[in-house]
Image (tube, rainbow, N blue to C red):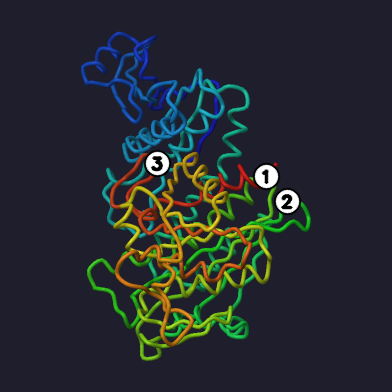
Amino acid sequence: MRITFAAALPTAAVQARLVDADGWETGLPAVLATGAKASRFAGKAGQVFEAFVEDAGAVRRVALAGTGKPDADDRLAALEKAGGALSAKYRASGETVLGLDVTGLAADAVVAVLLGARLRAWKQDSYRTTLKDEEKASLAEIVVTGAVDGAEAAWVAATAIAEGVEFTRELVTDPANVLYPESFVERCRQRYAGTGLAVRVLDESEMKALGMGALLGVAQGSVRPPRLLVVEWKGGAEGAAPVAFVGKGVTFDTGGISLKPGAGMEDMKWDMGGAGAVAGTMLTLARRGAKANVVGVMGLVENMPDGNAQRPGDVVTSMSGQTIEVINTDAEGRLVLCDALTFVQREFKPALVVDLATLTGAIILSLAHEYAGLFSTDDALAAKLDAAGKASGDKLWRMPMGAVYDKMIDSPIADMKNVGARWGGSITAAQFLARYIDKGTPWAHLDIAGTVWTDKAGPTWDKGATGFGVRLLDRFVRDTQEV
């Protein structure tokens, strides 16, 4: 969807106006204010009222979008919600152009409205061939008028965020017969072309030479060969240690020999949501020219149950040299991540490491679909990520860690086992990963299993992939790594 700025609204467009909950009737034609009041419109964030009014002999379609209280603490989130509500209403309305009057809004407020509108408009329809006309997207452009100086430039800069979120959604949404380790890599190569991002790919033989027995053990049951995708952005001081983002990229997870139940298994195409978030974040950072050094590492595998698949009870040796008794082949994400974590620390000596993974169903039992779980051995890093989550809307909730949980994954025949008891499953998964972090390296693990996909539409996303993680990591870099 195009977003352009103009001096006047197009006459053929739906004409939308943003109004606060306080005094929303001010300046409105009586017929519009009366109709809105009768419909119980009150200017609440996300409310939309529509009417047809006569203007200079022509009938125009007019919309009011509520932005909530002007002094609310979550003002920018409310503005995003208003923009998203307009997109949701008019995306398949038959209208092609929406004229949006943003008179009186500061530049950051304008950006919030437009970001909400663009993100809510995204939907994957490319595989649908029988849509009825009334179901097809029609809204192609939003024309903005009344913007303050600097708003257009601010929006152009903010499109980097939208691009990253949309790329993550694209990756997470695509089915596993289209997106698998090799095609994930090629998709990234295509999208990163000309951005300044440096791409390196390790194949199976290179990973074997490095001793990545844990990651390769997960991949050995699939005909799709694994890949380790390494993406670098050097926007900071030359020679400064980078920030490392590491993503789990299981492009489809059957559970392996520990086969998942058939019902709902199709959802496991999004078990690469952590890698998807890292891929989208790297695109955003490059598009906006982030003044920081960042490396993204994505472990890409498919977990399948063929005759060569890893068995429960197998013992594998990770790149770190630590051995793992594989109790459950469906606890595969931590096996992928542990080798990716070792690789990024040895290769780049990062200033800090954050990993993201759709790691456990246990985190959904704990936090539902409202928060991602935050696990960390570094209080300062945890606080910075929590603040970035609150500011970006990608919300986190810190979970406990400690030695009492660590002993739950001790193995009688290896250095550790890949699952503990039934209880505290997301915590023991984090304890497993912590064993692969070098002493003194700040580290956080984000379990995003409940937040990368949704069965209901939200303020700035439709049903399906949310793009969770991109805005969080971008905000974290902005607030803590750039000067």
Helix or strand or loop: what does disc 1 sit on?
loop
Write the residue at 29% across / 13% down: 33
Which residue is painted at 59% across and 37% down in the image?
156
Q: Which residue is mark 3?
A: 460
- Does residue 141 lie above or below 14 as drawn? below
The dot on residue 236 is 2
Q: Earlier in the sequence, mark 3 or mark 2?
A: 2
Disc 2 crowd rating (10 Å Cα; few below 14, some 14-19, many 20+) is some
Q: Amino acid at mark 1?
A: Glu
Q: Residue at x 61, y 72 (%)?
A: 343
The reply to whether the C-beta atoms of the residues labelled 1 and 2 are less than 8 Å apart is yes
Q: Position of residue 231 (x, y in %)?
A: 62, 63
Determine the residue positioned at 35% across, 79% down.
328
Disc number at residue 482?
A: 1
- Judging depth in this view, the residue of 480 and 66 nearest the camera is 480
Q: With 63 as the anchor, is 294 left or right in this view?
A: right
Query: How many badges with numbers are in the image?
Result: 3
Residue sitting nearer the eye, 193 or 8? 193
